[in-house]
């Protein structure tokens, strides 16, 4: 069973920054891709950013230029650096590990609240 443990969420003012971490219980290169999703109250879960095993990244249009996904293979950890945070970034953020031929794995989620 794969475990994904997120950390780094919290309360931040508009314009501030946070870095989320997702520690996996096995090599992150054993997955085809890893990503961050978010779900705001009353809304569907949406993809924020993803990185493939080959290093290709993609971002939701709403976060391009503000968020950066990265990884540290020595720590089996994926990060999401979030800058210039906006009220609308408030959500529970989930780490995802994707296999093309298998199940997706999810973390428990970490709350990010942007408020003045």
Image (cartoon, grey):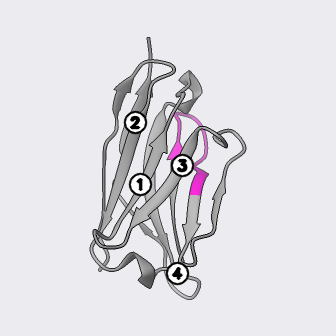
In this figure, which residue is indicated by the disc labeled 1?
Answer: 79
In this figure, which residue is indicated by the disc labeled 4?
Answer: 99
Q: How far apart are marks 4 and 3 (CA)?
A: 22 Å
Which tag, 2 or 1, sits closer to the chain's start?
2
SS for dot 3: strand
In this figure, which residue is indicated by the disc labeled 2?
Answer: 18
Q: Is residue 109 visible?
A: no
Q: Where residue 41 appears, x then y in whole percent? A: 52, 33
Is 18 in front, or is 106?
18
Q: Distance between the residues labelled 3 and 1?
A: 8 Å
In this figure, which residue is indicated by the disc labeled 3?
Answer: 68
> Label 4 near label 1: C-beta < 8 Å?
no
Residue at the image position 43 percent from the left and 18 percent from the top: 13
Which tag, 4 or 3, sits closer to the chain's start?
3
Residue at the image position 35 percent from the left and 44 percent from the top: 110
Instruction: Tell me which segment is drawn in magenta.
Output: 38-49
Answer few, some or many: residues within 10 Å of disc 2's Cα (few below 14, many 20 plus, some between 14 and 19): some
> Label 1 near label 3: C-beta < 8 Å?
no
Looking at the image, is mark 1 or mark 4 nearer the viewer?
Answer: 1
**In the image, is 106 to the left or to the right of 88?**
left
On screen, 99 above or below 90? Answer: below
Q: Where residue 62 appears, x then y in whole percent? A: 68, 38
The quadrant the C terminus occupies is top left
**In the image, is 9 to the left or to the right of 86?**
left
């Amino acid at each position: 069973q794969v475990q994904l443990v997120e950390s780094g969420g919290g309360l931040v003012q508009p314009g501030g920054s946070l870095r989320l971490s997702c520690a996996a219980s096995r090599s992150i290169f054993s997955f085809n891709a890893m990503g961050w999703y978010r779900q705001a109250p009353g809304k569907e879960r949406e993809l924020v950013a993803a990185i493939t095993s080959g290093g290709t990244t993609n971002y939701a249009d709403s976060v391009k230029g503000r968020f950066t996904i990265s990884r540290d293979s020595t720590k089996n950890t994926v990060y999401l650096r979030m800058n210039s945070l906006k009220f609308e970034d408030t959500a529970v953020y989930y780490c995802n590990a994707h296999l093309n031929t298998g199940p997706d794995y999810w973390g428990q989620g970490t709350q990010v609240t942007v408020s003045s």
